Amino acid sequence: MKIATFNVNDIRKRLPNLLAWLRAGVPDVVCLQELKAAEAEFPNAAIEKAGYGAACRGQRSWNGVAILARGCEPIVTRAELPGDPADREARYIEAAVNGILVASLYAPNGNPQPGPKFSYKLAWLERLLRHAAELRAAGVPVVLAGDYNVVPTEQDIYPSRSYANNALVQPESRALFRRILDAGWLDAIRVLYPQAPMYTFWDYMRDRWPRDAGLRLDHLLLSPQATQRLADAGVDREIRGMDGASDHAPAWVVLREAAKARRKSASAVRNTGTGKARKARAPVRKVPSARRPLLVIDGDSFAHRAYHALPKTILRRGNRPAGAILGFANFLLRFYGSEQPRAVLVAWDTLGAPTYRHEAFASYQGGRDTFQLASDATTVLYPVRAGEVARIGPAEVRARYGVDPEQVPDFIALRGDPSDRLPGVAGVGAQGAANLLRRYGSLEAALKAGLFPELAEKLRLFRSIATMNAKAPLPRLPDQKPSWQKASDLARAWQLKALADRLANLARGKS
């Protein structure tokens, strides 16, 4: 996996340069900084056309960070750097991509110094140091990529006295960067190129690019789990010489495929793709019958999404609304084409009849967290946008929550879940819940150790409500072939001609 960081210095102005570099370098993940654009101004259409999903935190005229992922959608785990609720500057975003937790960060410049801007820079880097420690403790591969606005050593700047008073080179800034490295993070570029300058920034002024008067400001720091997979790294410095270029060049690392993933076949069985789906552009493929997956659909979730996604002007016979029907049918057809399942099971909530969860907890609302089902045999298809899917396995769950899939119900009980109206433990939060489970292994073990004695029974109740019932009765599910013609006839009777024609083509063996 090739992961890059690139300060684009105004994404709207540099969009042609960015797209040209994406085509040439084909990075798998890109961390962008200094977007200088509000989220509504982010060029989603152009990025998607280039084959990338995107998650961004924008800010008009200043700052702004984003993460791009080739062929899939980044699963955002955090949209701000913790530690200062009053900080509204768009400088940090974090997401899981194919089992790697990636952060795009844009540290404050800090000039002029001394002064409030420099104090903010140092405080921000202190917060990054604390959060980096939490991420490292999660035990998953993490890449902290971005414009740190720190020149780590004199080796990382051209011979010059003009930066002597600049915040980028001050001892306090360098000391904080060194503390992050000393806490167990690897500076990938410097480790692989211990003697080369490896500049990533050349100011527009005083012919600094032609003179190669550069600075190394853009860094990719790797957690121990990511370090074990480091294969290559570099700087695409030629991008700085393009017409209309940013004053930064992209830096990148290549991580080897995880050993466990290499042992698995690329066509591993997916038993479920429960109810929620997002971005992964999976091609239609033929799967041998013995290995074809069972596809399980959360009917209410998809029907709800379809109803709100399509205009209410779509009508069927009798001028009755048909947007939800059409959208739901499109979901099913898309998944059937991409997954080629041996059978499809659509599950629906009970209508008006309380379940055991309602009886046990009157405020229960019926939300879902299917990530607990992820395993070597089960992949969750998670909603992103436009009906595309992110594929969630155990590695993605660990990257998102910091716990294993089987610990998700315990995690939900401790953290809480607004969708199910589960309050959790006040003040624990997501990171606290993950830390407790890493320490004790389970909610039950934490309770037996004496934690939360007044809440013990409620927490056990919350865990039971959050737990999927693996013993729910199901009929035998034999392999089934869709009744395309029957479905086409029904759609035609409802006067949904385009859908009826599409189904009729499938009945005739046409895609």
Image (cartoon, rainbow, N blue to C red):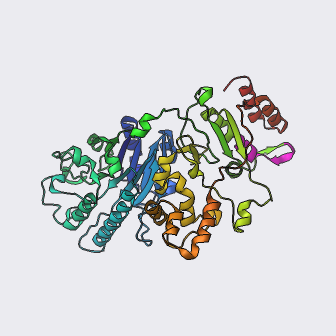
Residue 323 falls within the magenta-colored stretch: yes
- Extreme-front residue of the structure: 448
Image point (57%, 58%), residue name = 409
Q: Characterize the magenta stretch by its predominant secondary structure.
A: helix
Where in the figure is residue 185, as x and y percent of width and height? Answer: 29, 55
Answer whether residue 167 is visible to the viewer in this image.
no
Answer whether residue 22 is visible to the viewer in this image.
yes
Q: Give the left or right position of residue 151, taking residue 275 as reference.
A: left
Residue 433 falls within the magenta-colored stretch: no
Where in the figure is residue 278, as x and y percent of width and height? Answer: 57, 45
Q: Give the left or right position of residue 143, taking residue 182 as reference.
A: right
In the depicted structure, whether residue 502 falls above or below residue 382: above
Q: Looking at the image, how many numbered discs can be counted on the residues?
A: 0
Image point (35%, 61%), residue name = 133
Which image quadrant is residue 127 in? bottom left
Write down the region rendered in magenta.
317-329
- The N terminus appears in which quarter of the rendering? top left
Where in the figure is residue 161, as x and y percent of width and height? Answer: 12, 60
Where in the figure is residue 88, as x and y percent of width and height? Answer: 44, 68
Relative depth, front residue between 465 and 6: 465
- The C terminus appears in which quarter of the rendering? top right
Relative depth, front residue between 95 and 150: 95
Q: Give the left or right position of residue 217, taking residue 27 as reference.
A: left
Image point (58%, 71%), residue name = 456
- Extreme-bottom residue of the structure: 454
